[in-house]
Amino acid sequence: MRAQAPTVLFLSACVGEGHTAAAHAVSTALLERVSDAHCEVVDSYRYASNVFHRVASNGYIGIVKLLPQLYKFAYDQAERATKISAFKTWLHRYTALNLRNFVSELQPDVVVCTHAFPCGVMAEYKREFSDAPAVVGVVTDFVVHPFWIHRNIDRYAVGTAAMRHTLVSRGVTPSKVVVTGIPIDARFARPMSKRRARQIIGVSTDATTLLLMGGGLGIGPLENALVAIDRLDAGVQTVVVVGKNPSLERRLREVAKTMRHRVKVVGFIPNVFDYMRAADVLVSKPGGLTSSEALVTELPIIMLRPLPGQEERNTRYLEERGVGIRVERSRELTRALDRLLGSPSLLERMRRNARGLAHPNAADTVASMIQSLHDRRLSAPIR
């Protein structure tokens, strides 16, 4: 008799695109393994209080853009905390109770959390309900914030050995923590020549190509960066991926008309992997997913004015390992690009370092973990 296919609930969070992208990457990898698996990706904030949902989904970007030092202070304080606050415990429990009916109806075998908030919620859910499913926490940055850490989570998928050490040192059972890398769309790992990728995205096949990105929400100083790139003496072409920001896209299209170098501006695109394969250098915010995609495509990164908190920590990790260069101002960007484009040996060294850090099969490794937890659940004796 054929074993029952798993039902898997992915709990993400609507702050940026990376957490949801990671969920979809693992979901796709699981369906490659078990074609009749039932996977559902849900924004966990929908089950929090209405006020918190609005603040989390709309306020995060506003805070980090307008009051970055306030966000940095809050992040640093939370990072140093040894206990979860009473408010966060209440919010986790409140959301867990709100999730009860949905989880009871869906009856997932495994819940996968790609953000710290739902991980805390499911830790509380497991304390509250004896019939709770297995829970996997998938950390989508190169650092583990304490909000991720709960001793009753069944498995953690992390990006680095240092992250594993952090979890274990905070009391998580070593066998529960697996270094998988950060899960990304498997299409980033498919081999493709730069020439072919450039044909696909519609740019010159023989020009040095810079990829300028602002994340899925299209934030960051993209206009200043474009001006800085245009100061280069070297002949380059730039592709700007704006994301979900139509007004910025329109403005950059107008700016592009004044540039000496060729510029192509696009909005939100489904095939970022083609754009990364086409590029020689990425200029971007160092989000966990974007950075992991760049590592897999062996793309050197210039990290443009990282946001405080996770991006700051990601920047430190990538800089120390020789795959990225941090810049804060537009003139620094011009100098960094001059240095990179003028040194083929440096570019090659950064590509080689990226290759050493990349985890192209991370999504499939997490999918295997989910499948294993499901199989264990099926074979467990009925009480």
Image: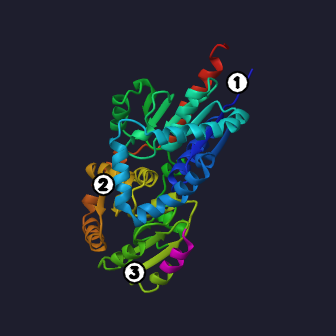
- Lower position in the chain sequence, tag 3 or tag 1: 1
Residue at image location 50% in from the left, 30% down from the top: 153
What element does badge 3 sit on?
Answer: loop
On screen, 26 above or below 324? above
Q: Residues within 10 Å of mark 1 (few under 14, many from 20)?
A: few
Q: Residues within 10 Å of mark 2 (few under 14, many from 20)?
A: many
In the picture, residue 342 is in which quadrant?
bottom left
- Amino acid under label 3? His
- Tell me the quarter of the image containing the C terminus: top right
From this view, report whether residue 261 is shown above or below residue 350: below
239, above or below 44, in the image: below
Give the CA distance from mark 3 to mark 2.
25 Å
Label number found at residue 350: 2
- Helix, strand or loop at disc 1? loop
Give the magenta-colored segment's residue range. 245-252
Q: How many marks?
A: 3
Please name the residue that numbered disc 1 is placed on. Answer: 3
Q: Position of residue 266 (x, y in %)?
A: 53, 71
User: Going from the N terminus, do you reach mark 3 or mark 2 first?
Assistant: 3
Q: Name the foreground residue: 40 vs 208.
A: 40
The majority secondary structure of the magenta stretch comes to: helix
- Secondary element at image label 2: helix
Q: Quadrant of residue 99?
A: top right
Label 3, on which residue? Answer: 261
- Inspect the magenta stretch and tell me whether residue 21 lies in it: no
